[in-house]
Amino acid sequence: MNLPSLDLRAVKAASLRSTNRQLSCFLLETLDGSFARFHTRPEDVPLLVADAGALVSENGYTCGREYSLLVLSHFLLGLGWWNDPASESVWSVTHVPGLTHDERLDMLTVQAVSHRSRWEGHLALMHDLTRQMLQLPEDECDPDRQWRSLEQLMTLRGIPGDAQRACYCRYESDACLRYALPAINHVELNENEIRAYRYYGKRLPQPADDLYPLPFLSRNQVLLHVLLAIAFGRHFYLNPLFTPWVKSLEATDSPRERRLALRRELAAHQQALKESSQHG
């Protein structure tokens, strides 16, 4: 009797789909009553799990426990978090020498939960700062004040001071690609030029200065993208948990309406965070 041939790829895909369903059920049960805290809706959770699962499996992680924990990490830290500058410290634990694979995986999971906890603990204050930034009309923004606010946000997000310029530029570059805008070229000062600026009391140029020559809508698109990337992760706009947010922002080409829409979303999330902490 000839046995039927098996399509091993189909078997693996079916296994991963089953795991995804189990992970989705686990998250839905765990989050019951807390969806607003995670800025999401129940129907978006399986979509995030599927997208995270695709990323994880594409990178060669398909074993049960390893796959499940890595998918959950994308829920905690944002889709595609492992190439987000804000989460670099978490991914670095995978390169700690002297540990077994399982020990690294356990350490990664602990770090992901800890990182999410610290991050979420600062989100309400981060939303305050962002909403203050968004109160000012586009043509009344003070470049120095705006950059200081961005630095504050990145500091609260846990991004080291010496990595903040590069992080900002990465998010800015992502925004330009997302909106099909020309790349923004920044003037890079060498050490002698920086010393000269300081000696003569001149203001050092900051990366966000180069937003101001852009048209209002383009400037708004880049700035709001950067603000959301700092708050919620580099790939927030690809994350199904943010589908309603992204749709509300992209529903209008009015910079003013986009700012108002984001302020409303942040205020609602801020309230959910406060209510969660009061009941937690």
Image (cartoon, rainbow, N blue to C red):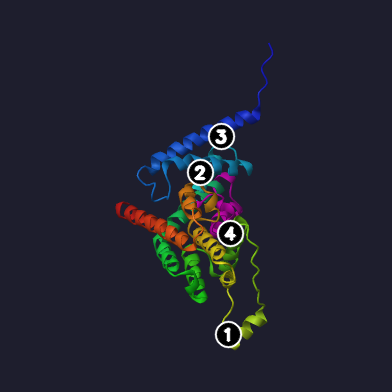
Residue 224, position as x, y percentages in the image: 51, 61
- Establish if 114 lies above or below 149: above
The residue sitting at 30% across, 51% down in the picture is: 279
In this rendering, which labeled residue sits more in front, label 2 or label 4? 4
* Amino acid marked by disc 1: Lys
Q: Upstream in the sequence, badge 2 or badge 1?
A: 2
**Among the two numbered marks 1 and 4 on one chain, the one whose residue lies closer to the N terminus:** 4
Q: Are marks 1 and 4 in contact (CB under 8 Å)?
A: no
Q: Compared with residue 42, is residue 6 higher up or lower down, i.e. above or below?
A: above
- Give the amino acid type for the residue marked by disc 2 in the picture: Leu
| Contact? badges 3 and 1 (CB < 8 Å) | no
Across and down, in percent, residue 64 comes to 55, 36
Q: Which mark is residue 16?
A: 3
Q: Identify which residue is drawn at 60% across, 58% down.
A: 174
Is 9 inside the magenta-drawn segment? Answer: no
Q: Which residue is mark 1?
A: 202
Q: Badge 1: how crowded within 10 Å, few (<14), some, or many (20+)?
A: few
Residue 248 horizontal/vertical position (percent):
46, 52
Which residue, as the protein is rendered here, is positioned at the far left? Answer: 279
Q: Is residue 82 visible?
A: yes
Q: Are marks 2 and 1 in contact (CB under 8 Å)?
A: no
For disc 4, the marked residue is 175
Q: Given the image, on which type of amino acid does mark 3 rest?
A: Leu
Which image quarter: residue 206? bottom right
Q: Which residues are magenta?
A: 77-103
Q: Amino acid at mark 4?
A: Ala
SS of the residue under disc 2:
helix
- Mark 3 or 4, closer to the camera: 4
Disc with the residue nearer the chain's start (3 vs 2): 3
Pointer 3 with pointer 2, Cβ within 8 A? no
